[in-house]
Image (cartoon, rainbow, N blue to C red):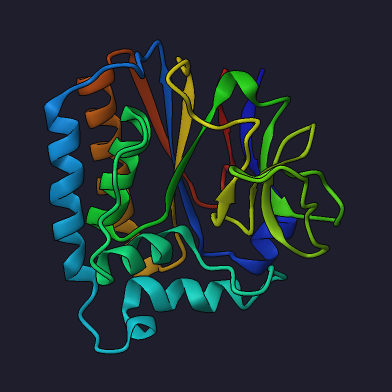
Amino acid sequence: MKTVRITDSFRALFPDARIALVCLEDIDNTVTHPDIETGLKLANEQAERHLVKEVFSENPAVAVWREAFRKFKTKKGVRSSIESLLKRVEKGNPVGPINPLVDIYNAISLEYGLPCGGEDIDTIEGDLLLTVAEGGESFLALGDETEDPALPGEVVYRDDVGIVCRCWNWRDGVRTMLTERTVRAVLVLESVDPARNDDLAAAVEELAARCTQFLGGTARTAILGGSPDEFILL
């Protein structure tokens, strides 16, 4: 059995955080559908509604994560995944296609102004934990050739082998990345603002619906919010 589990060490830092999950099975991530590409283009335009402040860092979708990242150890200059996406929109450099599943979750992330990521379930070893690193856990990031271990006190997703995603939602690793060969995946949406709990619930349902609409298969959803803090993947 594989589960996604939030540990007490994470909850001590972020008691109000909500983690929304979509578990996908029997999907076809080789599908090409014009509506996926169109959806991503529209999402880049819709993301402008999250950029209402003259100073980029003062936009609520950015500011709330800046504050969250101050509560744990991070690499210098690290930002949340949603800030990275919105910064591209602000600079007129739209988020482009990668593969169907990633394009779908990036579109949802941009539309709702929430961090979203995903991992291939079949490459996760044991349980997937959202926790605080002891330091030194192995991690090889996408695009890197050498490992960059976790820092002590860093919020991470990890499994029995090592780190799956550094600095909470900053950067995914190579080992569990979503590819065209992925048939079972877990997608994760995150919120640290209780005022946006309804947005998170709407986003996870929309994410599940689009994935099954375009990629087939089945989807199960859950939102972890303290009790229980565990979701069974397989």
- In this rendering, the answer to whether 220 lies above or below 84 is above
Q: Residue furthest front?
A: 145
Task: Give coordinates of residue 215: x percent, y percent.
Answer: 28, 18
Q: Is residue 55 left or right of residue 135?
A: left
The residue lying at 35 percent from left, 69 percent from top is 87
Task: Give coordinates of residue 137: x percent, y percent.
Answer: 83, 47
Task: Give coordinates of residue 56: x percent, y percent.
Answer: 33, 82
Who is closer to the viewer here, 222 or 83? 83
- In this rendering, the answer to whether 172 lies above or below 127 is below
The residue lying at 78 percent from left, 65 percent from top is 153
Which image quarter is the C terminus in?
A: top right
Which image quarter is the N terminus in?
A: top right
The residue lying at 77 percent from left, 45 percent from top is 146
Q: Is residue 88 left or right of residue 12?
A: left
Task: Give coordinates of residue 28: x percent, y percent.
Answer: 34, 13
- In this rendering, the answer to whether 208 lies above or below 131 is above
